[in-house]
Image: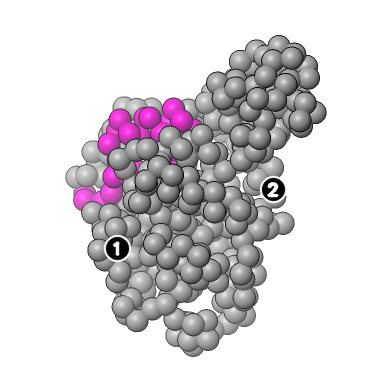
Amino acid sequence: MLLNDIISGKVDDAVYIIAEIGQNHQGCLETAKKMIYEAKKSGCHCVKFQKSNLPAKFTQPALDREYISDHAWGRTYGEHKEYLEFSKDQYLKLQAYSEEINVDFTASAMDECSLDFLVELNVPFIKIGSGDANNFPLLKKASRLDLPLVISTGMQTMETIERIVQTMEDAGKRDYALMHCVSSYPTAPKDSKLQLISMLKRRFPDVPIGYSGHELGVVISQAAVLLGARIVERHFTLDKGQKGSDHQCSLEPQELGTLTRAITNFNLSAIPLPPKEILQKLNGGQELEEALQDAQCKTILPCELLCRNKLGKSIVAARTINKGHRLQLTDIAIKVSEPSGLTAESYMTIIGKEVTDNLGEDEPIFGSSIIL
């Protein structure tokens, strides 16, 4: 598989292109199959979905909250997500169809149960999305798998990325890649921070660096390749006007085809190129100039706060915990919580700390919930 060759360093003049179908299939198996076909026809190497076990990913209050949106498929957020979630049987059918037309098939593991599901499905690699890039229990479990990992870094700091790399090193994990990503939908050119690709390549020379883009159009993704991205992921849709919040920042088949053809025509052995040459090669323009502005430090951008506040994961009680108990790893879970608690990456700092009040299952843990 091409991805394995890129991650292992056997191939340095190719780009692996992922069509992120996600949940743009509207909960319809036949639509998903059509999307797989169109993505393959457009020249991508892989189609990717999103797999969630809803009780493992969300607390019950988060699932029960009323969901009022033009994009809603249910009265509550849980009903909405359940409508868009495929079963194991449906995943097997989609996987078989992908194999039939010779395109790689995988999904993002959005929780530990879904990670187990994808391992059982025997996918070629597993994606860890930006929402779980600070979910270190999940990352540690994934690092022990005999499967390549592709890890996005949206709405994370450089400190968290350093910790991801250290987690992989501690496990002896070599077959993984990091994706520069900005979790804003769509991402404005000025927020794309493409030069962070160059920074990540310098900082982690032994780790393949890719790009997961949410901008409009394809030229910024082309520039990402010219900076050295060896994996490119873009959301994919049959029609941007469809119901669903991800369609607007997705590529339609013609756009995806334009992107794959452009990448195929690049002389990949001659890159990375400096920003000035990229501007010249891609005929410049203000948006591309903004995307290529100098960027040396990975931070959580203001444009990412909406997504982080909505889907960022918190530390919650995995079971009923009595006041005075000292927290152990088995006492906590990492979930999307309503309301949010301590952020996922701080879970190790609370182990052994005393609980100041009784906590119910799925209740978020705050700084005030423990004696520091």
Asked whether residue 255 appears in the rendered view, the answer is: no
Which residue position is annotated with label 2?
306
Q: Earlier in the sequence, mark 2 or mark 1?
A: 1
**Which of these two is toward me, 351 or 193?**
351
**Which of these two is toward me, 49 or 139?**
139
Above/below status of 327 relative to 238 = above
Q: Nearer the viewer, mark 2 or mark 1?
A: 1
Measured as percent of width and height from the top left, residue 348 is found at 61, 34
Q: Which residues are magenta?
A: 101-125
Measured as percent of width and height from the top left, residue 243 is found at 55, 44
Which residue position is annotated with label 1?
9
Q: Secondary structure at mark 1?
A: loop
Dot 1 amino acid type: Gly
The residue at the point 54 percent across, 54 percent down is 162
Measured as percent of width and height from the top left, residue 172 is found at 37, 46
Q: How is the image coloured?
A: one colour
**Which of these two is toward me, 97 or 106?**
106
Q: Residue furthest left?
A: 100
Mark 2 burial class by Cα count in 10 Å: few <14, some 14-19, many 20+: some
Above/below status of 80 relative to 129 = above
Q: Quadrant of residue 302?
A: bottom right
Between marks 2 and 1, how big is the CA–CA gap?
Answer: 36 Å
Above/below status of 117 relative to 106 = above
In what quadrant of the picture does the C terminus appear?
A: top right
The residue at the point 58 percent across, 31 percent down is 334
Measured as percent of width and height from the top left, residue 98 is found at 26, 45
All told, the count of numbered labels is: 2
Above/below status of 102 relative to 205 = above
Q: Left or right of 123: which side holds 185? A: right
Dot 2 amino acid type: Leu
